Image (tube, helix red, strand yellow):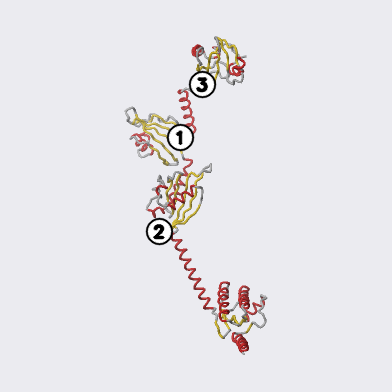
Amino acid sequence: MERALLFEGCPEPLAIVVGDVIREKNPAWAHAVGSNPSLMACFAPEDEAAVRAAFAQAASARVSFEARLAVGPHRGASMRCITWSSGGEARCLRLDGPALATAAEIARSKDKALRWIFDQIDAALWVILHDGTLALSEGNALSRYGIRPGDYVGSNAWEMFPPESQTARTARRVLAGESVHDAYAEESQYWVQYGHPLRGEDGAVFAHIGLALAMTENVKDVRYGQELLRIINELPLVVWSMRADGTCTLSAGKGLERFGLVPGQLVGTKMFEFYKDDPLILEHYRRAFAGESFTSENEYRGDVWRNVYHPAIDGKGDVIGVFAVCEDVTERVRDERRIREQLSLIQAQKRSIDRLVSPVLEVWRGVLVVPLIGDLDEERAAVVTERLLGDVVRHAASFAILDLTGIDMVDTNTAQHLFNIMRGVDLLGCKALVSGIRPSVATTMVSLGLEVPTGRTYSNLAEALRRCMRSVEVRGR
């Protein structure tokens, strides 16, 4: 009964052993180890001493040990084992799973992993001794020069590579004690290389180890980026970017000269600290880091700059930086201001001309005349209407004569403006008359279907004035 309870629900291989005989086992043990009744037959012979020692200690304590299986599907695997006394000579033995790798095994696995990675990448690895001897030459990238791994090992690098070649220059720097990380183009190949000095126990450099990654497939993009940066540095702009911590990562453009800076000078600078005394710029930074894209125009040191801000967002939607393009628009703003001022002046002059061209004249008590000359557009009609209606009220006029002698052509819009003026005058109790309609104007008005009320039109201004004067005299009697 106790054994049944011991085995119940136990997922790990578990057995009860007396001496060397396996008396009871759970299904997991049978699956992992099999049905062999001998305990020692289950483990590798070289681990027999460790198993017996663990069982001897288990009489008084719970003992953990490792041993390799000799049978079952996990044959050869090193297992973590626990044994303890279950009364008398009986011992419980449980297999907890594969043992953790030893330090040596981890080191071997790491070495295999690094070798596998190196075999997958387009790279070259070499070692040059202080006297120039090539001690190591490995890597897929060697094939770019028609070289196989191991070729030329033992040869002298100073004889193989010209003194001014990139390899020779880098080797001299590293053998002088300098670590190198740079990029360079060599004919049709583009490389990123790392060089590190190897030192002996006395600290002296005895060799140069180098690693070069072939980036030739990306050389077009790199050169395009370099050309684009060169063009930006010739334009009157400022293009910059910074990381989330405020560090400037790009500072380019000829516009930097306006601030006494050169391209690249701000790279590495903490921008929040650099502009700590400028609250407007700091506010723009905060808006951009909050995820907002926006454009602003602000005056800075006497100039007006147009700034376009955009947040840099990663795949998770987090803002990881900010980039901006700034343009000096001082001349454009000044030109726009001058244009607005000139337009305002022109409009004022036009209103003055309209008043001169279309004056409202009181030619007789209660009789006003408005001579119209040229085109009667909407703006001019509004000026004439405003002035005429005001004078009708001010002079208590009975008649207002619109003289068209100076108008050669009438279209639908002009006719509509005339009728609107006449209607406004009539609403004030003053009769509006029209004089000086030329034959061409009359023909156009008829073809357009425009009619002036009967008794309101006269061939010339004199006839209209006589009509008004007679009416005024009659009223006066």
Q: Position of residue 38 (x, y in %)?
A: 57, 11
The answer to whether residue 169 is seen in the rendering is yes
Ranked by sequence position, the earlier of labels 1 and 2 is 1
Ranked by sequence position, the earlier of labels 3 and 2 is 3
| Other residues around mark 1 within 10 Å, as few (<14) / some (14–19) / many (≥20) | many
Q: Nearer the viewer, residue 53 or 314?
A: 53
Give the residue number, with chain letter if any, for mark 3. Answer: 99
The answer to whether residue 437 is seen in the rendering is no
Q: Position of residue 150 (x, y in %)?
A: 43, 29
Give the residue number, with chain letter if any, for mark 1. Answer: 123
* Residue type at numbered disc 2: Gly
467 versus 285 height, above or below = below
Ranked by sequence position, the earlier of labels 1 and 3 is 3
Q: Secondary structure at mark 2?
A: loop
81 versus 139 height, above or below = above
> Is there CB contact under 8 Å for labels 1 and 3?
no
Extreme bottom residue here? 477
Q: Nearer the viewer, residue 232 or 103?
A: 103
Say which mark, if any, is on residue 302: 2
